[in-house]
Image (cartoon, rainbow, N blue to C red):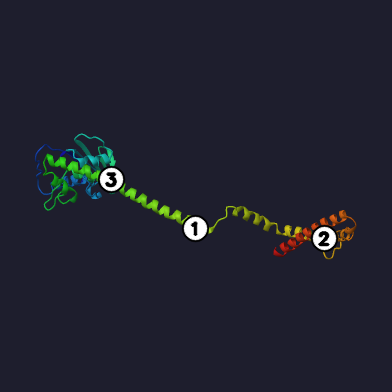
Amino acid sequence: MLQEISIKNFAIIEEIHLSFESGMTILTGETGAGKSIIIDAMSLLLGGRASSDFVRHGASKAEIEGLFFFEKTPELNSALLELGFEELDSEIILRREIFANGRSVCRINGQMVNLTRLRQIGEFLVDIHGQHDSQELMNPKSHLRLLDEFGDENFEVIKNNYKNKFENFKNLRQQLNIRQKNEQEFAQRIEILQFQAEEIEAAEINLEEDELLVNRREKLNNIKNIADSLSTAYLALEDEDNDYSSLNNIRTTMTELDRIGNFDKDYQELADKTAESYYILEEVANQIQSIMSDL
């Protein structure tokens, strides 16, 4: 219920303050007296569309403020809680300022709010009826509430019980959806891990492969030094153009000892050891030559 309204610099109204009592209040007067302007001011106070045309000529802004008494309902309490009003008595003050540049400022109990919030609260406080429309009856959001008002006290108990159970159902359904989603994600994760495990197994990765690759890289980085060392070692063991290579010297030693082996078993034993060394070194020379050809 609208208890008081103050209007300042609105249209042709310079300043007016009206108080309303319980029951019916009738505004009468000639055409153009300003009856509809008061209704327009109330409409703007409840979140109607603003325009700089409403600002009185010569003023910087129009001001409208209303004091309302209200009956607490779950819907209104919920809307007020969203605005941060935890507990209100049965009074609420709406205020709206419309500036000459078209900007407007809305307040509820001194707290600045946007137009949507003002309109949302205003719908619970006043219903403006015209010749051909009804703000509340034409608003689908109010239909269910109007229908519920025909119920008795038992209906309200049943309704609240149903509301609580329905909220519980929605919470359980949300939890179920989350669990089902988690199960799907787990299944997908398992499938991905299995696929990756199969790929790793198919790759036949050698645990020592890193070390082998490092050694191979070091070998390739030093390939010239390796080739030079192998060549030097091979020439030292066996060089056709060098009569004093190691194998030639050992071959000569082996031949001379073998020739006198018949005279003493010690000579023959030395000849055998020299022959064994010769064949070992000859195999080494052959391997070096093979490695060099692969470089």
> Camera-side residue: 202 or 215?
202
Vertical side of 74 occupied by 197: above or below: below
Residue type highlighted by circle 3:
Leu
Vertical side of 36 occupied by 259: above or below: below
Q: CA distance from mark 1 to mark 2?
A: 53 Å
What residue appears at the point 70 percent right and 64 percent down from the top-left corner?
294
From the viewer's perspective, is 280 left or right of 268?
left
Q: Position of residue 5 (x, y in %)?
A: 18, 39
From the viewer's perspective, is 268 left or right of 148?
right
Q: Which residue is mark 3?
A: 172
* The label number, if any, that marks residue 199 in the structure image: 1
Residue type highlighted by circle 2:
Leu
From the viewer's perspective, is 3 left or right of 206?
left
From the viewer's perspective, is 279 left or right of 25?
right
What residue appears at the point 62 percent right and 52 percent down from the top-left corner?
211
> Camera-side residue: 39 or 192?
192
- Where is residue 70, by image quadrant? top left
Helix, strand or loop under label 1: helix
Q: Is residue 197 visible?
A: yes
> Camera-side residue: 273 or 212?
273
- Where is residue 62, by image quadrant? top left
Q: Nearest to the eye among marks 2 and 3: give it.
A: 2
Helix, strand or loop under label 2: helix
* The label number, if any, that marks residue 46 in the structure image: none
Q: Earlier in the sequence, mark 2 or mark 3?
A: 3
What residue appears at the point 31 percent right and 49 percent down from the top-left corner?
177
Q: Position of residue 274 (x, y in %)?
A: 83, 57
* The label number, if any, that marks residue 247 in the structure image: 2
Q: Nearest to the eye among marks 1 and 3: give it.
A: 1
Residue type highlighted by circle 1:
Glu
Q: Position of residue 191 (x, y in %)?
A: 42, 55
Which of the image's four quarters has the N terminus? top left
